[in-house]
Image (cartoon, rainbow, N blue to C red):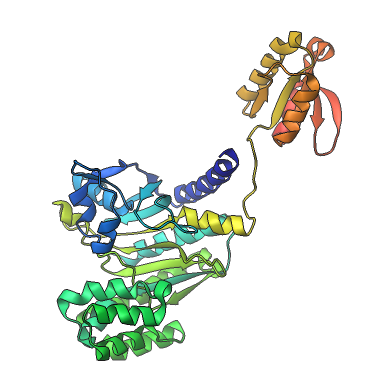
Amino acid sequence: MPEQMIARKKVISTVEQVFNRFGFYPIETPAFEYTDTLTAKCGDEVSKQVFKLEGTKFGLRFDLTVPLSRVVASNTALTKPFKRYCIARVWRYEEPQKGRFREFWQADVDVVGSSSMRADAECLSTAASALKELGFNGFEVRVNNRKILDAVVTQAGVPKEKEFDVFRSLDKLEKREEEGVKQELKDRGIPDDIITKLMDFIKITGSNEEKLELLEGMVGSTEAGRAGIDELKQLIDFFSKYEISGDCEIVIDFSLVRGLDYYTGPIFEIKIPGGNIGSVAGGGRFDKLIELYDAPATPATGISLGLERVIAVMQDREMVETAKTVSKVYVAPVKPEFYDYALKVVDFFRKSGVAAETDLMERSLRKQLDYANSMGIPFVAVVGAKEQKEEGVMLRDFESGEERLVSLEEALAKLSS
């Protein structure tokens, strides 16, 4: 409804402005993709959530990353880095709940073509800056690395063919808590001793430096472990150079897994303290996804803001102003014979960039004023014989109650201030 949409559009506009300031540029992809494209690397559980169009080889996109990969694979001559953003609807067949719907909006930024952790830090800082611009502060940026997870599960003795099953289970830790995840791992055939090792790992606490030091002793001697540790260090270092890092805390969190199969390196989420809604942003590096679509190997990384969750938290905290209309002024003809002049005044305001409306119901002046007041329109410009003769309006400020006869130019100056 209008009140909700006006608030949503303000949020989307703010996010888009930040994306533009960081030098990302927009693309748009179709709502549907080939089913094979959608399910190539999303994992069994997400595959079950894809809305498939019956009798066709198409399905609705479940995120904005897979369509991006197809676009890049189809346009291999793109200048790199390719920095894109996309703000659009996606669909997942799952049980609706607060901040989670079957149709919802995501706002993505991605950098394609760079294997440097500079690109990951750029995406993280862009998303964090968008949240700050919306009025959030003190939020938590959680980071981990899929290479580290690979090294840990290998060292713990998880069979190669069950690694992603383990990741998928660990990704549910926040929803199902430790005992629920342990039981799911057992159901997947993971022995108790391996489950104990995995749980000990994800519960490691301490400062980022202490966690990295412990990690060095655990998997620092392995190729994947060493690479993951180096990437985490670089990511944290690059992110700390951005001004936004002073408004949030970056935390290494080994329980952060992210269930999609296409992540290959750093993974990250952003949480709002006291939001009670899970993460509001998430993403990571997907260096091997684009090549699945018959393209050369192309490094890529990105992050997605979940707009439904962001807006839900903002509504809970009354951070979003509600309005029934975007109109700044209502032009009210005193009698029907002054309607032509009212249209002239409305045209003047609209051409000057001021949202304006006038009577379409042939109402009395009193009913027009009641309408404007009920809609929350801040100003009314009453027009009658005197106003028409002097080419002005009787401008009334509903908030202060002030009313005076002014020229059209004076009215415009007041409305634009």
Q: Extreme top residue here?
A: 337
Q: Where is residue 193 in the image (x, y as percent from the top left)?
A: 26, 91
Total labels: the figure holds 0
Q: Where is residue 301 in the image (x, y as percent from the top left)?
A: 32, 60
Decide if residue 219 is on the left or right side of residue 389.
left
- Residue 8 visible in rendering: yes
Q: Position of residue 302 (x, y in %)?
A: 35, 58
In this picture, is 255 found above or below 262?
Answer: below
Decide if residue 372 is on the left or right side of residue 252.
right
At 84% from the left and 38% from the top, the residue drawn is: 400
Q: Extreme left residue here?
A: 294
Decide if residue 341 is on the left or right side of residue 100.
right
At 22% from the left and 55% from the top, the residue drawn is: 39
Viewer-proximal residue among 377 and 355 = 377
Q: Where is residue 414 in the image (x, y as percent from the top left)?
A: 75, 32
In this picture, is 17 found above or below 414?
Answer: below
- Residue 410 visible in rendering: no
Q: Quadrant of the C terminus?
A: top right
